[in-house]
Amino acid sequence: MGIVAGLDSSAEFTRIVVCDTDTGAVLRQGYAPHPGEPKAVDVDPQNWLLSLGEAATGGLLEGVEAIGVSAQQHGVVPLDARGGLVRPALVRNDKRAQIAAADLVDSLGGRQAWAEAVGSVPASGQPVAKLRWLARTEPEQARRIAMVLQPHDWLVWQLLGRPVRRTTDRGAASGTGYWSARTGTYRPDLVELALGHRAALPEVLGPADPAGTTPEGLLISAGTGETMAAALGLGVGPGDAVVSLGASGSVMAVHHEALADPDGTITAFADATGMHLPVVHTSNAVRALRGTAEMLGADSLEELSALALKSTPGASGLVLLPYLEGERTPNLPGAAGTLSGLRRASMKPEHLARAAFEGMICSLADAMDVLRGRGVEVRRVFLLGAAAALPAVQALAPALLGVRVVVPQPADYAALGAARQAAWSLGVARGTLSPAAPPAWQGAAAQLLEPGDELAEGRAVRQQYTATRDQLHPGAFGS
């Protein structure tokens, strides 16, 4: 039996899991918050190291033979020619870069040009947009930038003692806005377009490649972004999709190729195994539930859920289009939410509550259909987020999504994915594992929900929702 560790440096904390290399069983765990302002968009990367050191106290890493690193995505760590920090790292979905992102879209000739170039359209959170913002607002600092890393790249580099070679992986690179998952290559001209000059970029490693070995002989694997690490920790594979329920929503699926999407609805991420993770985002998910709860005077989403289950499928004809903050899928940035089907019989709190849940899940089903329309097979859905535990979500999701639904038990899946990658890289280095597939660890403990006899009801609800959507927003999905 060997021992490996996975660390996840998220936006606000570091979590470490120490695992058995053969089974993935968690042997020890560590946790520490990041020092400094929790919601800051400008962060000293040294805070990540301080948090890592605190999380690893008490001999947590004793006996560990390899470490994998997962970290928050889309951050920019700008370095000068000597490897020094030019300014604090830019992290999170930095709204300051919204205008910069729009400028970049126009500079290359529109959304389709970007989608064809790198599989995504610039958004304020992406490194390419942050670089444009730096060039426009902090030109002196921007001119000093000689190397651009992301948080996981920087942490790996630090763990290895700051070697000359700097690395990243396909997953993290695919979110930059200047690396294409389809071609597997950088577009340095897009860095120049954003920053005003070319900058060095880290070498992109394969999924099982080591980033290096410390002087003490500790192997450090390639590492990856949090999304890709969580997918690896969950054990998702071809035929699986992951539906994430936050204030906004997303649907991503494992696919064998990168999808070139002309209008940028699909973002072409790479995963941490050599496959691809096409993602479709929605602007509204749990925010629609919270808004409905406030309207009805419900004290919690649990109370709203209980109220919704007093209604019947179709919510007595009520349909809520949950486009409260505009919408990305379909592309309706100026839209507002709509409540349709009001009749005297439907004007009851339980029907509005159910319409909110049905509207949220139908909107995510629309996003999933975008992927299916491009040939992505979905036989099973992993449902993530705190709202996945709500009884109304679990009662409605299988029928409305039309497939088996898996609700994993809460766990540090990004850290687990990083540990699994470390075990894979260690096994390949020792000749005990193939570089073609990660180790077969035990699957995530989960609740399984089958569509069962409710499939017909689910189809009827989807038809009601779709008819309302198409009447109010004809051609939203090109039909």
Image (cartoon, rainbow, N blue to C red):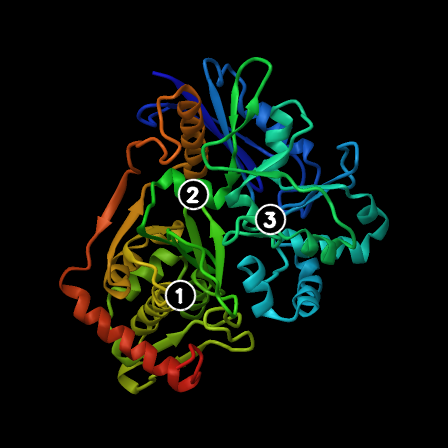
Residue of label 2: 274
Residue at left 48%, top 22%?
Answer: 66
**Mark 1 or mark 2, whichever is nearer to me:** 2
**Mark 2 or mark 3, whichever is nearer to me:** 2
> Dividing the image into 4 quarters, which one contains the N terminus?
top left
N-term-proximal mark, 1 vs 2? 2
- Image location (x, y in percent) of residue 125: 61, 55
Q: CA distance from mark 1 to mark 3?
A: 22 Å
Which is more toward the observer, 249 or 36? 249
Furthest-right residue in this view: 140
Q: CA distance from mark 2 to mark 3?
A: 20 Å
Q: Quadrant of residue 367?
A: bottom left
SS label for mark 2:
loop
Is label 1 in contact with label 2 (beta carbons under 8 Å)? no
Mark 3 closeness class: few <14, some 14–19, many ≥20 residues within 10 Å: many
SS label for mark 1:
helix
Which is more toward the observer, 424 or 297? 424
- Image location (x, y in percent) of residue 471: 38, 86
Residue of label 3: 74
Which is more toward the observer, 135 or 400? 135
Residue at left 65%, top 51%?
Answer: 127
- Image location (x, y in percent) of residue 28: 41, 22
